Amino acid sequence: MAFLLFFLTWTILQLLLLKGPDSLHFFGELLWMIIFYGFVGIYLPQRIKQKYHFPYNLKRKSPILFLLGLVLLCGVLGIGIFTSGAFSTVAKSNISPSGYIKYVLLFIPMSLAVSFYLFNLFPHTILSFIKQKGIGVIVLFVISALASSLCFAGDTLLGDMELIVIMAIFGALFMGVFILTGSFLLTWLGYFISMYFNTLAEGKYLDYTWYLLIFGFMFSMAMLLIGSRNSIKQTHDNGLYTEKEKEVNH
């Protein structure tokens, strides 16, 4: 239900921004920063994490799997940034230093919002219900691909089928990074870098006003701090608590 709210909020606000009158554009951007970034994208998943005692990471005992995850992350970034031509497009553009900063302020909250659902709530929820890890991992790949494609179907209002398919593939690949490394931070960082360069290459958001971006970033970080109190101390083992961990957390 939380992801459905996330998807509907994303789609409705995009509809307002892309199809609504120009007089409502600033209002739509403000709602995007407050409702989508702050509350639905960042605060809500933090509260769900606390309710069900979901931490940020999965426990990984094998350094080989972690190294494989790093290799996969490098491969995904290589394809997403260099092979796609996004890096060369950005390098050849005349974007000012302020433009790079604007995109940092805009896409740190954006990438966090998507990552909290795809690479945190989904893995821990599914692995908590599906006891057979092999089946659980397969389900995770499918769910992450479908959810990622659904998000960008809403983002483009079904206007870019190629992007929707690409994001489905990248959603599954980044899920692979999370499963292998067990690290939310690494997975989010890779996702942010990929999103940053590809959106910067398009240059659609360079005209966003500074005060709106700064407000949105600060509000999102405040929601992150408020929503994630104490949850960072929790530990988890592939979505399944041990009896000792249950005693500690309760």
Image: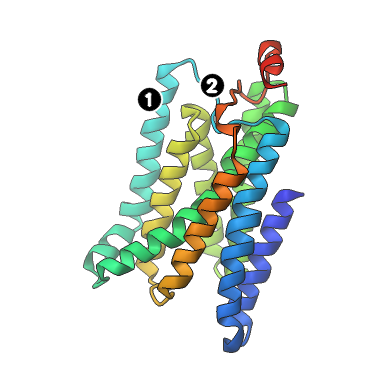
Residue situated in front as seen by the camera: 101 or 181: 101
Say which residue appears at 63% left-offset and 83% top-offset. Answer: 20
Kindly state the secondary structure of the residue where label 2 is placed: loop
Residue 6 in the image: state x and y as whole percent.
67, 56
Reading the image, the residue beneath label 1 is 67
Q: Is residue 42 left or right of residue 241?
A: left
Residue 198 in the image: state x and y as whole percent.
39, 60
Kind of residue at disc 1: Leu
Say which residue appears at 38% left-offset and 66% top-offset. Answer: 102
Measure the C-alpha gap from mark 2 to mark 1: 14 Å
Say which residue appears at 61% left-offset and 54% top-offset. Answer: 41
Residue 188 in the image: state x and y as whole percent.
47, 43
Could you say which disc has been placed on residue 173 in the image? none
Residue 114 in view in this figure: no
Among numbered discs 2 and 1, the one appearing first in the sequence: 2
Q: Is residue 199 above or below residue 237?
A: below
Residue situated in front as seen by the camera: 4 or 139: 4
Kindly state the secondary structure of the residue where label 1 is placed: helix
Could you say which disc has been placed on residue 59 in the image? 2
In this rendering, which labeled residue sits more in front, label 2 or label 1?
Answer: 2
Residue 47 in the image: state x and y as whole percent.
68, 42
